Image (tube, rainbow, N blue to C red):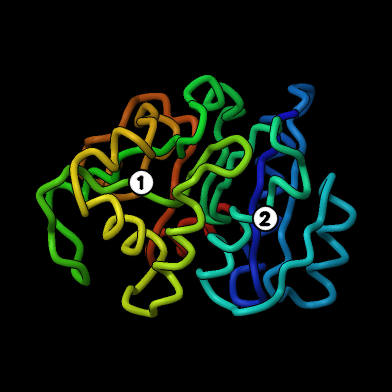
Amino acid sequence: MNIILTGCDSNTEWQLPWFVKNFRAKCAGTGCKLAIADFGMTTDAYTMAQIDADYVIDFEGEGGWFNKVRLFNHTHTVFGNDANVCWLDTDCQIRRCPDQIFSYVEDNKLAMVIDHPWTENGSPWTPQGNCGPWYNTGVVAYKGRPSILFPWMKECQTNNHRGDQEALYTLLNEDVGKRFVNIAEVPHRYNTLRLDLLQNRGPDDPCITHWTGQKGKEEIRRQMQ
């Protein structure tokens, strides 16, 4: 079973109709199932999710970005250990069905794309380490419950980080071996960032375009119009 998973709360649910429309247009007939996690949506958005998704996961709790990593630790209880799961942030535009990303999933690893802007320029909020690249957490594919998920969740709980991407980077930067053990790198086309496009660094045929930041939100609103 191949699952495309996303989630939102009342602050980001406005992107959900756009996300679902792209999923339907590009993934119809592929066998991929859509799962939407409720991180605190309004009643209207929750009702829409029940209509549009194959699965709705009730997961309102601690709020904000932290819910995503908590959810990753939980999906094996919903879909089973043999299901392929690919998380997409709701600001990710599906241009082609991303089901081929599952061919890069390895046992006990997270399949992720390098965050090229942060690898080249650093994060404004986290000191740059020397153990390898950043990985963008807007697209994460895996099977079962890779062992890095629980430490990642615990690192998020320290409240020492601006977001889940910084928390994961901190864990992976403890030593070089952690990247080899826990991460399977995925081609750039599966998570092409807005800055990649702006800086002419992205592939010509992105499968997923990730419209990050305020300018990304403006692009999503433009497309929704």
Residue 145: quadrant of the picture:
top right
Front residue of 102/8: it is: 102
Q: Nearer the viewer, mark 2 or mark 1?
A: 2
Q: Residue tagged by mark 2? A: 74
Which mark sits nearer the N-terminus, 2 or 1? Answer: 2
Q: Which mark is residue 154?
A: none
Q: Say whether residue 23 is left or right of residue 176.
A: right
Is the residue under label 1 in contact with that under label 2 (CB below 8 Å)?
Answer: no
On the image, the x and y values in percent for residue 10 come to 66, 77
Give SS at disc 2: loop
Q: Residues within 10 Å of mark 1 (few under 14, many from 20)?
A: many
Q: Is residue 34 above or below residue 16?
A: above
Front residue of 171/190: it is: 171
Q: Say whether residue 133 is left or right of residue 205.
A: left
On the image, the x and y values in percent for residue 191 come to 42, 39
Q: Which image quarter holds the C terminus?
A: bottom right
On the image, the x and y values in percent for residue 141 come to 53, 38
Q: Residues within 10 Å of mark 2 (few under 14, many from 20)?
A: some
Give SS at disc 1: strand
Q: Which mark is residue 193?
A: 1
